[in-house]
Image (cartoon, helix red, strand yellow):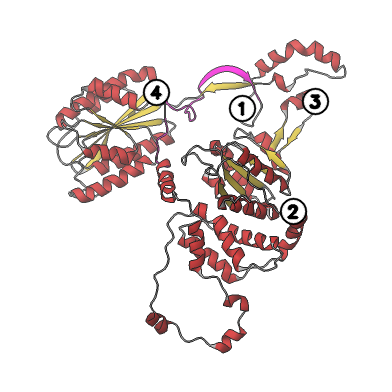
């Protein structure tokens, strides 16, 4: 008989519990590439007591929630509404879950939070750990099965019979769990670094579903352990550690002798309560071998800067309507606007043929294929923030280069619609010498009195850049950052000298700036580039450029290229 891998057995057990209580458990994330193995898993979901609907990451609001059918309303002469998928309880299967846009993830999360009986199956096809289903959705689903490492061979699909599932669903309302077991699940979640209250609630519901599958009316120790193994491993954030062992002498000092008379009156189930250490070890055994590598890649993914391949700024967030583009056929999704003239122009040539088929119709006959939607190339302005290290003996040379680079970028701003800002840090603090502007006259006036000399408050400069970039993003701009420095900060954030504290403050400020995921370049202008600026670029998740002898035009060109210009 073929040996069943433990990952496959746990996945089937999770699906069995999901068949008993799909609404309570929320659903499941299945990580597997397209192939025979995933087809068998999808086949298993046909046993859910809900209608199955396959959806797409590009699902629009009308398809999900329902809405006005414009074409049918125009054709019928009355309001016609389309029914949405969420109007009745259903199981939604979402392939390519790693490509789910944030808007759809938020709407599906809201749908699950309503508690109207829906379930969600996410089919994650990511090629690496950085490509994953949205965390907001995965947290609301009880189970996560990673089958990507299983060999593509025939594995048995061992699931309960339909009659057994019906009996388990009928038994589920009568299944009870003790308060002590519930407390164990909460404590175990805390020891695993799980800070969400959903995890122990889902584990509790899983334990009840497993007990119902076994025909029990009370959750047993085995059900509790199995529920922890199925729900907690994908949510674990720390390596579980056992509590320090106590010696026999310590136990004798702290634990009084048991009272046999009280034990005789106690609940017999509590006398055999499963130790917390056994639960902890059971969950630890289910963690993947590359658990630490996955945690590290998850942390790095939150700091990876978003690519911005156009010097004209991001297309998704704009601070004006944008340049009109030719209309295109499409479906209404609640956000697009109809191009009425183009729609009428598309429907006009076919009116005689349509009237021959529908002689009772009055007015224009418009079909869904006639609908034309307006399109705009919606771009936001780009904001290039220069952070210039104005300290030390070489400050005057760097100031001249920075002035020239800013002036070169300003000269191009009229064509590219760029804004430019300048932050200088010297002495004990940082100063925004040039707020976001496209005025060449104002820039030259502000740059003429740029000071230099003193210490290197690099942390203060990074905080000033962070505040400026955050304000620019809120104003609808697309910030990019170019920092000219040798990375050798010696002034702490509070203005006191000291390289040790200055380095700690610099790392904290750099990682905070990196969370904005902006295109960033660190330009080392020292005569002998060192490791400090390269380390700074690592903290920022930025591109590192060593330009010890570059002039203003070379610095401007390098910054423009690094920031996607």
Q: Which residues are magenta?
A: 302-330
Where in the figure is residue 67, as x and y percent of width and height? 70, 35
Label 2 belongs to which residue?
Answer: 161
Q: Are marks 3 and 2 in contact (CB under 8 Å)?
A: no
> Which tag is nearer the camera, tag 1 or tag 3?
1
Determine crowd level at label 2: few under 14, some 14-19, many 20+ residues with C-alpha closer than 10 A.
Answer: few
Q: Residue furthest front?
A: 1
Residue 169's image quarter?
bottom right
Q: Secondary structure at mark 2?
A: loop
Determine crowd level at label 1: few under 14, some 14-19, many 20+ residues with C-alpha closer than 10 A.
Answer: few
Instruction: Judge left or right: residue 112 versus residue 50.
Output: left
Q: Nearer the viewer, residue 93 or 64?
A: 93
Residue located at (32% from left, 22% from top): 439
Q: Nearer the viewer, residue 387 or 539?
A: 539
397 to 9, vertically: above or below: above
> Which tag is nearer the camera, tag 3 or tag 2?
2
Q: Secondary structure at mark 1?
A: loop
> Which tag is nearer the camera, tag 4 or tag 2?
2
Query: Which of disc 2 and disc 1 is earlier in sequence?
Result: 2
Q: Are marks 1 and 2 in contact (CB under 8 Å)?
A: no
- Separation of marks 1 and 2 at Cα, in angstroms: 47 Å
Residue located at (67% from left, 63% from top): 211
Where in the figure is residue 89, as x and y percent of width and height? 72, 47
Where in the figure is residue 421, as x and y percent of width and height? 31, 30
Q: Residue furthest left?
A: 393
Instruction: Judge left or right: residue 405 versus residue 397.
Output: right
Instruction: Judge left or right: residue 217 versus residue 221.
Output: right
* Residue 77 circle label: 3
Label 4 belongs to which residue?
Answer: 311
Query: Which of disc 2 and disc 3 is earlier in sequence?
Result: 3
- Separation of marks 1 and 3 at Cα, in angstroms: 22 Å
């Amino acid at each position: 008989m073929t040996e069943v891998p433990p990952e496959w057995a746990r996945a089937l057990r999770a699906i069995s519990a999901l068949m008993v209580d799909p609404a309570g458990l929320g659903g499941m994330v299945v990580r597997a590439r397209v192939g025979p193995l995933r087809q068998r898993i999808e086949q298993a979901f046909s046993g859910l007591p809900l209608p199955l609907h396959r959806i797409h990451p590009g699902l629009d609001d009308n398809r999900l929630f329902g809405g006005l059918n414009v074409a049918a309303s125009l054709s019928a002469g009355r309001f016609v509404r389309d029914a949405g998928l969420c109007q009745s309880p259903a199981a939604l299967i979402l392939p390519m879950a790693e490509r789910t846009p944030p808007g759809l993830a938020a709407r599906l999360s809201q749908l699950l939070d309503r508690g109207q009986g829906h379930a969600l199956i996410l089919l994650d096809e990511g090629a690496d750990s950085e490509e994953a289903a949205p965390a907001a959705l995965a947290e609301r689903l009880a189970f996560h099965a990673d089958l990507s490492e299983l060999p593509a061979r025939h594995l048995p699909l061992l699931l309960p019979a339909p009659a057994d599932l019906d009996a388990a669903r009928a038994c589920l309302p009568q299944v009870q769990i003790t308060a002590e077991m519930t407390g164990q699940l909460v404590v175990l979640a805390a020891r695993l670094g799980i800070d969400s209250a959903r995890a122990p609630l889902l584990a509790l519901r899983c334990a009840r579903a497993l007990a119902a599958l076994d025909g029990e009316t009370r959750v047993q120790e085995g059900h509790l352990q199995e529920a922890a193994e199925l729900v907690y491993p994908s949510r674990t954030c720390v390596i579980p550690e056992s509590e320090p062992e106590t010696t026999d002498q310590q136990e004798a000092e702290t634990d009084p002798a048991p009272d046999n008379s009280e034990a005789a009156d106690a609940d017999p189930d509590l006398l055999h309560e499963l130790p917390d250490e056994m639960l902890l070890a059971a969950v630890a055994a289910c963690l993947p071998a590359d658990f630490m590598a996955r945690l590290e890649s998850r942390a790095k993914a939150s700091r990876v800067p978003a690519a911005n391949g156009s010097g004209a700024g991001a297309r998704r967030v704009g601070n004006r309507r944008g340049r009109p583009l030719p209309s295109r056929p499409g479906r209404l999704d609640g956000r697009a606007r109809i191009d009425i003239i183009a729609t009428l122009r598309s429907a006009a040539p076919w009116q005689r043929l349509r009237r021959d088929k529908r002689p009772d119709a009055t007015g224009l006959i418009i079909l869904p294929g006639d609908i034309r939607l307006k399109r705009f190339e919606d771009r936001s302005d780009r904001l290039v923030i220069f952070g210039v290290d104005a300290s030390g003996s070489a400050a005057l040379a760097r100031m001249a280069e920075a002035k020239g680079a800013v002036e070169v970028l300003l000269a191009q701003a009229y064509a590219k619609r760029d804004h430019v800002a300048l932050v200088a840090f010297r002495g004990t603090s940082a100063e925004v010498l040039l707020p976001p502007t496209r005025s060449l006259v104002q820039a030259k006036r502000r740059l003429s009195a740029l000071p230099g000399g003193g210490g290197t408050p690099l942390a203060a400069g990074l905080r000033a850049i962070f505040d400026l970039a955050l304000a620019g993003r809120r104003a609808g701009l697309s910030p990019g950052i170019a920092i000219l420095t040798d990375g050798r900060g010696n002034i702490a954030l509070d203005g006191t000298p000291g390289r040790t504290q200055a380095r700690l403050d610099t790392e904290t400020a750099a990682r905070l700036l990196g969370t904005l995921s902006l295109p960033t370049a660190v330009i080392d202008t020292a005569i002998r580039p060192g490791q400090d600026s390269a380390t700074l670029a690592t903290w920022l998740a930025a591109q590192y450029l060593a330009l010890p002898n570059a002039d203003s035009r070379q610095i401007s060109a390098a910054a423009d290229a690094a920031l996607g210009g």
